[in-house]
Image: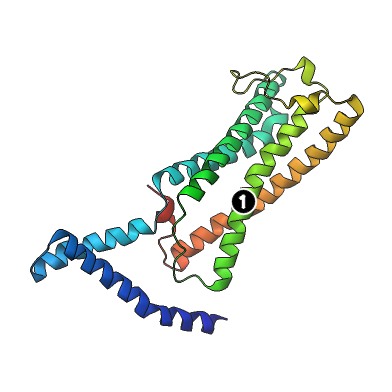
């Protein structure tokens, strides 16, 4: 497998050189550079910058990625420590956990729409077929979990028997965000839904922890072990 990947990389090298030369010629044609020194100092740097920009995510995609990442990590921490907080803080912590989750759900929808309208940059040429397959599978699995976690939590909370006496407003501002169709069910059905979706929410959370760890380790491996500018693709 490693020998095959190396051979494939070598076969791709002339194509990559041709692409870079094409970018250089385009830069010279566009900016009208003349003279060897001028060409060396300006056209090359412009072509390299254009190639790097092509391999980076858009600024909107970067912003959505990091906002969602920070909110998810914060929500994981909040969910883990909520039971250990003083009694007077627990209700506020739980409501904040719910607000973050629903906000992440909304941002995930925006991120997916943006991705369809603005396709992400291609993976580096050095990735082996197995790495490409793993990267795509992990990416879509993360998307699935980013949607599944807040949705299961939303359903779980909407079926809570204490919901009528504990109203929940998104960030304390937008009221009545629970799912009315679930709130209207009979008590026994809601109790079953509450229990089942709590278990799903917990197990999806564990799956997310594992995938996030793989995502981070993979990015660091490509950045520092393989020498690819992996982090620069998602940094402003």
Q: Position of residue 127 (x, y in %)?
A: 49, 70
Which of the 4 quarters of the picture holds residue 54? bottom left
Element carrying mark 1: helix
Q: Is residue 172 above or below residue 112?
A: above
How is the model colour-coded? rainbow
Q: Is residue 233 above or below residue 190?
A: below
Q: Residue at x 15, y 64 (%)?
A: 41
Quarter in which the N terminus is drawn: bottom right
With 31 as the anchor, is 52 left or right in this view?
Answer: right
Q: Residue at x 60, y 51 (%)?
A: 212
Q: Position of residue 6 (x, y in %)?
A: 48, 81
Q: Residue furthest top?
A: 165
| Label 1 crowd bin: few (<14), some (14–19), many (20+), radius 10 Å | some
Q: Considering depth in this image, is 73 or 51 the residue closer to the camera?
A: 51
Q: Residue at x 47, y 67 (%)?
A: 225
- Mark 1, residue position: 142
With 140 as the anchor, is 161 left or right in this view?
Answer: right
Q: Considering depth in this image, is 96 or 132 the residue closer to the camera?
A: 132
Q: Considering depth in this image, is 183 or 117 the residue closer to the camera?
A: 117
């Amino acid at each position: 497998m490693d020998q095959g990947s190396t051979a494939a990389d070598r076969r791709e090298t002339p194509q990559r050189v041709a692409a870079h030369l094409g970018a250089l010629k385009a830069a010279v044609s566009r900016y009208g550079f003349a003279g060897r020194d001028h060409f060396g100092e300006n056209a090359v740097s412009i072509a390299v910058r254009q190639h790097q920009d092509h391999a980076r995510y858009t600024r909107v995609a970067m912003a959505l990625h990091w906002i969602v990442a920070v909110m998810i990590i914060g929500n994981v921490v909040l969910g883990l420590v909520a039971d250990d907080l003083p009694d007077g803080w627990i209700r506020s912590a739980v409501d904040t956990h719910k607000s973050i989750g629903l906000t992440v759900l909304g941002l995930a929808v925006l991120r997916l729409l943006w991705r369809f309208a603005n396709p992400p940059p291609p993976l580096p040429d050095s990735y082996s077929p197995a790495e490409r397959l793993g990267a795509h599978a992990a990416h879509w699995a993360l998307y699935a979990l980013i949607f599944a976690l807040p949705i299961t939590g939303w359903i779980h909370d909407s079926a809570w028997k204490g919901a009528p006496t504990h109203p929940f407003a998104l960030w304390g501002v937008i009221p009545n965000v629970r799912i009315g169709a679930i709130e209207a069910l009979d008590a026994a059905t809601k109790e079953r839904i509450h229990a089942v979706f709590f278990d799903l929410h917990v197990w999806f959370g564990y799956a997310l922890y594992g995938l996030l760890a793989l995502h981070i380790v993979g990015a660091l491996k490509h950045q520092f072990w393989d020498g690819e500018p992996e982090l620069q693709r998602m940094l402003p």
